[in-house]
Image (spheres, rainbow, N blue to C red):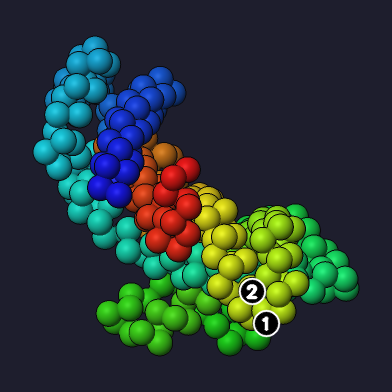
Amino acid sequence: MLAFVLKRLAAGVVLVFVISTVAYALIFATASGIARNILGENATQDQVQALATELGLDRPLPEQYVTWLANALSGDFGVSWFTNEAVAVTVTNRLPVTLSMVLVAVLMTAIVSIALGVAAAVRGGVIDRIVQFVSVIGFSLPNFWVALVLVLAFGITLAVLPATGYVPFTTSPGGWARSLILPVTALVIGSTASAAQQIRGAVIDVLELDYVRTLWARGLGRNSVLFRHVLRNAAPPALTVLSLQFIGLLGGAVVIERVFGIPGLGTLTVNSSIQGDIPVLMGIVVVMVILVVTVNLVIDLASGWINPKARLQ
């Protein structure tokens, strides 16, 4: 198990390095007139040139990247070019907001999609068709459209939930929960539709195995077969689906945060992209990749714990 963890960690480090390198090159390749954008159109050419020299933008790109990488390895991601706030502080302040929303959405997705997927696979018939129909509808609805409908219905028309804004958990747990209901619902509808279908397929595949038929023939109870054998063997693909949903929800949070006015990483990413705040963008990229690597490692460990056969794959 230790060798497995070390191997995954090494692969994660390589992944962070490769993605950060590619992201750095692509960001600078598509950026132009950075110093001019920071100072504004009224700045003189001498001012623009002085700022470019101060930021190191006049140096070759490989040299700039090496400097950034050396600083990043020591935990220094630089400062924002527009707010002069340390990138680490900026990202750290926004990260809990996005994570609280995404983690709650993943938890709700897991509960609902497992219930729907197992019911569709085991019961079949009308329940299966209903689940598939609802899943197709949910998957086809854009999350930003769902978010707008929820805002209009529950935030404005009925006024039973806050339409925008975010309340930190430390300020008010109740307010925090209320501020997350609508954005989490907007995320869960689409992710549950996709995950339920995948989990349904995984459970059906296990139900068709010979050893499961043998268990049924021996007269074991339904709950014993489902919970002790079927779900245990269907867990690895189900967990993989949920890990992919987590990654997808991180991306979906960009749109949802804009709709609901939530000050998370998604909003920060959009604003930094518009401004061309490269240090902040690179900090976000590194944090996102680390999150993905961590989640994948946790899912692999959980799969091995639930089903020891998964450790050999």
Question: Which percent across, then down, holds residue 274?
Answer: 43, 40
Q: Is residue 176 above or below residue 242?
A: below
Is residue 72 rendered to the left or right of residue 236? left
Provide the secondary structure element on which disc 2 rests: helix
Quick one: label 2, few (<14), some, or many (20+) residues within 10 Å? some
Is residue 108 rendered to the left or right of residue 22? right
Q: Is residue 194 above or below residue 19?
A: below
Residue 94 or 195: which is nearer the viewer? 195
Is residue 246 rendered to the left or right of residue 115? left
When asked about the image quadrant of residue 33, the answer is top left
Question: Which percent across, then down, holds residue 268?
Answer: 38, 51
Q: Which residue is mark 1?
A: 221
Residue 33 or 79: which is nearer the viewer? 79
When asked about the image quadrant of residue 255, the answer is bottom right
Q: Is residue 271 above or below residue 176?
A: above
Report the residue at 19% width, 39% height from top. 77
Residue 218 or 69: which is nearer the viewer? 218
Provide the secondary structure element on which disc 1 rests: loop
Q: Which residue is mark 2?
A: 225
Report the residue at 88% width, 71% height from top. 125
Question: Which percent across, then down, holds residue 220?
Answer: 67, 79
Are the residues tagged 2 and 1 within 8 Å (C-beta)? yes
Q: Amino acid at mark 1?
A: Gly
Q: Which mark is residue 86?
A: none
When asked about the image quadrant of residue 279, the answer is top left
Q: Is residue 25 above or below residue 187?
A: above
Q: Amino acid at mark 2?
A: Val
